[in-house]
Amino acid sequence: MYHLKVSHTFFRFLSMIAGGVLLWLPLVASAESSSQADHTAMTHQTPGWAEQLKGQTVVEDAMAGRPERAAMVERQHERIMLQMGQDAQTQQASGGNYNTMSMMHQYGAGGQDLLLVSDPRTEPVAMQGGRCPSGAPVRKYDISAINVEISINQWLDFYPGYMYVLTENIDKVREEEAKNKAGREKEGHDPGAVANGLQGQWIQPLVIRGNQGDCVKVTLQNKLEGGEDVSLHIHGSSMVVNATGKAATTTNPDSIVAQGKSQDFEWYIHPTTQEGGRQFHSYSNDRELTVMGLFGTFVVEPKGSDYLDPLGTGDPTPMKSGWQAIIKNGTGPDFREFVIIYHEVGDEAFRPVNKKGDFLPQRDPLTDSYRPGGRALNYRSEPFGINNMHVQHEYFGFEDESMGYSSYSFGDAPTTIPRSYMGDPAKYRLVHGGSEVFHSHHPHGGAIRWPRSPRAIDDMNLWYTATNGPVKYPVIRAKTDRVDVEVIGPSEALDLETECGSGLCQQLAGDFLFHCHVAHHYVSGMWGYWRVYNTLQVGDSRNDVMPDLRELPDRKGRMKAGVASDQLVGKTVDWFGKTFQIIEKGKTNWRSNPAVVTIKDWVEMQLPTQGKPGHKDDEKGQIISYDATVMDWTWQGNRAMSEKESTIDNPKYKSKTPGKRRPILFEPTTGKVAWPHLTPHFGKRVMFSPNHNGAPWLEMIHQDEDGSRSLDPAKPGENGRWSMCPENAGRKYYNVHFIKLPIKIAKGQGKEPPVIDKNGLIYVLHEEEAAIRANDDLKYPLVVRANIYDCVDWTLTSEWDDDDYTNFQSSKINTHFHFFQFDNQSSDGVITGMSYEQSVRPFTMLEKKNKKGLPLPMNTALTAAAKKGSSSITVKNAAQYHVNTEVLVGADNVKGNEIARIKEIKGNTIALTRPLRNDHPANDIVTVEFVRQRFWVDSDVGTVFWHDHAFGATTWPHGGFGTIIAEPVGSTYHDPRTGKEIRSGPVADIRTVEPVGYGVNGSFRELMVQVHDTVPHTVNIVTSGNPP
């Protein structure tokens, strides 16, 4: 008997078109309601600001070839406002203004936007507070509300805002503010006081804490300029005014603090209060103050906890505020806490300004994202285009959006970078500090996931289970689903206890991206990443530019400082029971116990192949070559030395030794390279992983039977307990192409022609590509499957050539997967932080007539046929390649594509390290533009969404996404009509005897429904009221 199982992949991304004209709207609410509002006077609301914005919009529209657009939009807005006014007058007598609230809010501005303003006389909130009992531990906070210039990144884009701050720290805020102002006055790229990762800085949203059972006493001082009243409302609290004992809600006028005044409050946190974050903000002038920064977070911690500063050396010191903290847990293991606050900068019409005082564009001209710099985390925003990519183009003549997250290409981000050591338990407090739009928090890393039902964590308590090593077999399923995306709206707070803690269940050092999953939001700056180290970050042993990082108190002594490779000689290193002896000279013997490995072999298997990108000696030449196959590192005796430090001027990374090499560090007890081992090289494409390995940090050992380095990925379990895929794992192989083709969205109806997306973009299995191109009914997003406990190997290439319309002569794509375990350094799909290149250029381009955009990919073609067993190939252009690098031979040859390693290059003849396994005709394509990814399906995560993450806003609407479904152990997949096994497709019979859900066993029929929006066309009948 078959069950019916319907899976859904649903994703939405926002595409908004703003008119760009600030309108002073007619009053549509009644005079009585108008008198209730006390609005904030801000410099950005002056007529001068509005006129400058309007003028700049006219100029931008003219530059874009749309000189009449601003006037048209303004006329349309005027018609809408007139209609709204008429509707309000008509409906007020019967139903009031409720029915037009949504439209009024969308077009409200200045003193006319009353809908989100609280009225103390009619506030619907009522609660009874309670004074603290005698004997409760007391925790005091003296907080001031102040005006402040908030710089959102190291390019010193900024806006005039507000913030809550501990009164004792106001002088420190003013020092940072002054340094930022001074930086804006300087020529060149001075970052002011803005540091990478928001580490140890004072201009940040206020985060304070209290324990279950504490008595929290707050003094609020109003030090704002301009006469605004303020309050401090903690969501979910029962705070009272200290003097009267009455509830501190906006129904109580004593909770409102006038300029220059102060008020005292207290809150008894009951011992049973739920642990976690709570947003606080002002209910006086709430919308204006909130969107400009006056918000914060109060975190309720476990009873008896202490809060310690994670930054510095020696024993941790107490801390009173900050978005990241060490929580010395009073009721369990110590953990790291990270408070990530999503928010907008101003309302949807507001624009920050750059260091010269010019408004940031409403739409980024390089990425087409909406409101660059207007989407932020903890007061920081790092938009891809207007700064990083713009300067990259000025320096080198191209811009590379696929590297937008890359610290190698652009330096560590100024946004939040949570930092921890591998194995540290960690908790995320997720908060929406803004008041405008919803966001969807999504962390990368596969195993960064949590139960959908909040308290189900009690039945699946995995957040600290990997403190002593990898977890390859976590709980398969529970009574709730696992999720890795969380939608969060204004003022909401969520607590995420991710599986296995720092380094995830894989126990991996790396950089783990998180961002809003609305494509335009992350491209506009709403992203950061979690950096997990495998070595102690103190003093000269640090691997990046950020401050010293302390260990957790109950894990002190576990982390060791990194050492140079020559200090590994003579040591026996241990990978959770798999040991290796490292020797200086002799011959490597992988079969002995322990394995004996020379220092040269040990290091070279962990790093990209040595070589000069583009065969160039100079830094700019290497960057312009766009060669990602080699890294210009070298040996100094037995000491591995990095490539030369960057000399390119930019505000995010300034090397202490520009143009010099530094020792590459390794963890002394495991011998693994210390993360991160790369440093920024502004504008440069990061290299592919060693041997295009999908798990370069977890599975660096992949040997053939003769002990030579294999061309294939590691065998499951080959790297011991630390293997990405454990011993006896099932296997799945997928060779995937990304193609462009016309897709029929709707068939013709009568005289109406069919609706066709001429720029359709989909992933296909290579062996199915020809059939899909020939059959319109097969042109849909790819659906594949893997069983629980399968090891999935995924090879990706692209046929999406450069063009002017869809990719701006800069085609690149990748595949990012959710849920599964993988090695982020090369299988996440996204080039996050110091991760390796994971996106590809098209292998089909053998020439490029248009010199704009990215350089020509390193492709060539065979000039003569090569037979199976041949040890060499002859190509049109061999000079571009490097010895000891990998090439894909026969990239478009369905029956004969294979990966080969270059042994020697003579003229246009390439000698290979291993004979060819297949026949290759003349003109077969040879390329370096491929990536290999590896995934471990460790649990029943069901429907797994994957997608392009290089040009998401462009590719998703045209089909650039897919699904892989985790099926029961040992399942087979069959065509429902023929019964034959299938490799892909949205409908399949899943034959199994295993559980398929909680309490359900047996085979079932599966329908995969992939719902998506913003497709280019949705109907085949186009009318004046229904444009395409």
Image (spheres, rainbow, N blue to C red):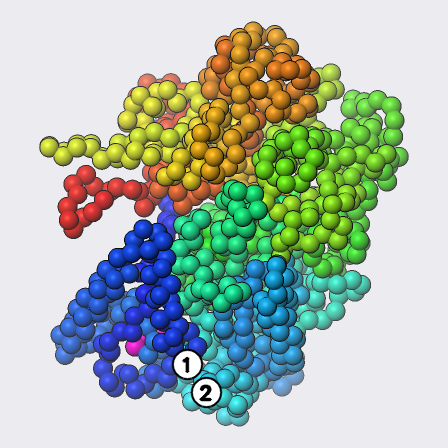
Whether residues under marks 2 and 1 lie with C-beta atoms below 8 angstroms apart, the answer is yes
Q: Is residue 149 visible?
A: yes
Q: Quick check: 752 left or right of 153?
A: left
Magenta residues? 112-116
Give the number of the disc on residue 227: 2
Answer above or below: position of 385 versus 887.
Answer: below
Dot 1 alpha-carbon crowd within 10 angstroms: few under 14, some 14 to 19, many 20 or more = some
* Residue at x 41% of width, y 80% of height: 40
Dot 2 alpha-carbon crowd within 10 angstroms: few under 14, some 14 to 19, many 20 or more = few
- Check disc 1 and report the residue beneath it: 41
Q: Nearer the viewer, residue 1009 or 183?
A: 183
* Residue at x 60% of width, y 20% of height: 878
Q: What amino acid is at disc 2?
A: Gly
Which quarter of the figure is the C terminus placed in?
Answer: top left
Question: x and y percent of residue 710 in the render?
Answer: 67, 21
Q: Quick check: 595 left or right of 76?
A: right
* Residue at x 24% of width, y 76% of height: 26
Determine which quarter of the picture holds residue 727: top right
Q: What amino acid is at disc 1?
A: Ala
